[in-house]
Amino acid sequence: MKEEFEMTREIKMSTKYDPQQVEPGRYQTWLDEKLFRPSGDTTAKPYSIVIPPPNVTGKLHLGHAWDTTLQDMVIRQKRMQGYDTLWLPGMDHAGIATQAKVEARLAEKNISRYDLGREKFIATVWKWKKEYADIIHQQWAKLGLSLDYDRERFTLDEGLSKAVRRVFVALYQKGLIYRGEYIINWDPKARTALSDIEVIHKDTKGAFYHVKYPFLDPEDTYNGQHYIEIATTRPETMMGDVAVAVNPKDERYQALVGKMLVLPLQGRQIPIIADDYVDPEFGTGMVKITPAHDPNDFGVGNRHHLERINTMNEDATMNENAGKYEGLDRFAARKAIVADLKAQDYLLRVEPIVHSVGHSERTGVQVEARLSTQWFVKMKPLAEAALKNQKTADRVDFVPDRFENTFSQWMENVHDWVISRQLWWGHQIPAWYHKKTGEVYVGEEAPKDPENWDQDPDVLDTWFSSALWPFSTMGWPDEDAADFKRYFPTDTLVTGYDIIFFWVSRMIFQSLEFTGRRPFKHVLIHGLIRDEQGRKMSKSLGNGIDPMDVIDKYGADALRWFLSNGSAPGQDVRFSYKKMDAAWNFINKIWNASRFVIMNLDADTQAVLPAKSTWKLADKWIISRLNQTIADVTRLFDSFEFGEAGRALYNFIWDDFCDWYIEMSKQDLNDENQATKAKTQQILCYVLDQTLRLLHPIMPFVTEKIWLTMPHQGQSLVNAAYPVVHQEYSDPTAEKQMKNLIELIKAVRNSRAEVNAPLSSAIEILIKPASAEVKQIFETNHDYIERFCHPRELIIDETVKAPKLSLTSVITGAEVYLPLADLIDLNEEIKRMQKEAAKFAAEVARAQKKLANQNFTAKAPEKVVAAEKAKLADYQAKEAAAQQRIKDLQAG
């Protein structure tokens, strides 16, 4: 066994970390061993997450990698903590987004969806879905996501489709879904309606076109003119004008109300009306009313029973109502109409402006406000129920909590949701129209005599089905479904702040409406990944980063480490290759430290601590520091502060374990006393074992590789027990003493470096402790001082006198002198000590200011305030000692 272990560790632990030797094949092994399934232990507490389903529109980007890495970290930790965990994967059909992609691919072959017909086109989209679902599966595997693929769902699979039909019918029967003619956002490229939040507003160059609208009666005038002045940004819609409106309280125009105007270029008569909608302070205080092309005008038209004249086709070309401009694209029509207005002396002037214009999130084209018959969800009662629930124990907790305001504000000001889309890819609306009578039938199944009915050709907004994701994926509407009863409500949703409106809010109100419960307990909100300059990644800027390329270069663990430590919850993160280099370097440090430990273990070494009676100071210290790190990381994971958890791990691994304990262990490992050696081997093995367990949720590949190379391991780290805090290992005294010792060793090393006195040259070291306690620490652990400081003579005494020409270091509880007269310049030493004194003084001022802040002293935990007071006392003592040393040097 010993020979086998030694040969194995030599093969598995190369001298340099290489992710290409560590990661490939590992994920498939985990899947083969079925390690990502729920435990099936009904006595264990369940913990579930549903993945925010990526759209099958393309490959995953860095944002997806960040989002899923955080989820994987949570679920891996909970799995190791003994929870019965379920992380359910799935993908979204993504309606308009996917259809647009497929249509673009067909267009390259000069084929339209109409050439194929609905059935063949949908079959083509299903092929696209399979292609990109396969790619996403490969990317999930490369990232190491511990998903239960046995439960994978798709928003168009039969189970979810049944849930969608059930919800639609129930809301319709309750009067919360209705069909009506309204002004909606229209995407003329995709030829479909859009909801308000699918519209992105961009600052766009435009103009106010000031146009004469003549009075019908030649006797009518305003300000001596036979016309009024109207300013519009959209002259292409003029052919749909049916009135001009003024505010009824605007004294300038009260005499004009009721008079008739002649619509320029067309000659149709339109009235001047009064309506409170008009802002007297904006522009001329007169606005043209075009009910079929503006939502506000639509409201005015309804109040005044005005005609609705739609002048555009679905593709934003002008229709027959546009007269001579029929067939022109909307922007070509604008140019033609402006030219004609100018030619016929209707155009007063053109005023260039920059204004906010809505564009389709999916196709990028300018959105039209279009009169259309659509299906809507009546939002007010649903929104009120969601807001009310936030005041109960079943509320959804947002992390950070400021995003609850984002949610609440949207729900308080929500408009009815247009849910029908003029697409072919998606959930076809479960409504049928009788061919003869026009009767509307809404049901989960088709009418019994389908030959007499036509189903509504529209599909539902993709967010309608994804709003049901947390419970429809669990088997709802079957409320007896095992997963629904066991794992719903889910525990944590991880998502970006950019889809709080689109998705988070809708999941909340739909879940409350249909299950009576919140869909998840926590929503962890992260930001966006930006480039090094802080810009959003986009195709137009060419600054996008493929996460798979990053993995190919650095490995998945390095990317996961960067993503987990990138920022605080809710904050954006900037991607940089320098940060990736640092992530790889950290893993390489872990790798080399692990290699050292494993190469110094015996085949029978166990990760079990030896008797405490055998522990030296360094042993007590590293076990206590490990214990504190376990407490910190567990607490920070529970509050989703992964960046802080990463810092705690980094500091412990790099500073405490690698730089100090491993170095201190080398002497014991070479000790002739086998008991001393075995003791140190056990502690090294134990600390490495616990550290790998802590790290595993963040970097699963390398920790698994190292874990399986250790002598005592035979099974995967995936299901290993997560470290827990042991109060009996907490040793503040050892930590304090080791801090003194480390500060001393650093001071001596820094002083040596100041005067270029290499560690190989033995020197005299004089230590003047300020107390018997500190003296005992240094005397008891003089072997560490001798090993790491290499003194020719070591004197530890309260009565030590500082030699005139010596390098001085002021540390906690002591002063350290290195008599190196031939290497020291007196003036330079005084300057150096003055800098030290100034540094201590600055720390004193900082601590005093902090302790003088009543907000800090009143709100901070007592332990934190006490620690700050201790720091102040320490820095005050150091400053006083430094100032005294300066006086001694200056006195000669």
Image (spheres, rainbow, N blue to C red):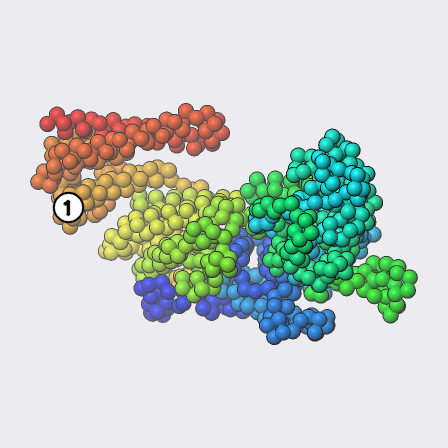
Query: Is 798 on the left-hand or right-hand side of 56?
Result: left
Q: Amino acid at mark 1?
A: Ala
Label 1 Cα crowd, 10 Å radius (few <14 / some 14-19 / many 20+): some
Instruction: Identify the residue position indicated by label 1 in the image.
Output: 757
Q: Quadrant of residue 706?
A: bottom left
Q: Position of residue 487 (x, y in %)?
A: 65, 54
The answer, for residue 700, to whether it is visible in the render is no
- Secondary structure found at label 1: loop
Query: Is 63 on the left-hand or right-hand side of 552?
Result: right
Q: Position of residue 40 (x, y in %)?
A: 62, 59
Residue at 27% across, 40% down: 743
Towards the viewer: 74 or 615: 74
The answer, for residue 580, to whether it is visible in the render is yes
Q: Position of residue 532 (x, y in %)?
A: 42, 52
From this view, report whether residue 656 is shown above or below residue 437. above
Residue at 75% across, 37% down: 221
Towards the viewer: 354 or 611: 354
As drawn, which residue projects farthest toward the right? Answer: 437
Q: Position of residue 499 (x, y in %)?
A: 60, 50
Towards the viewer: 560 or 865: 560
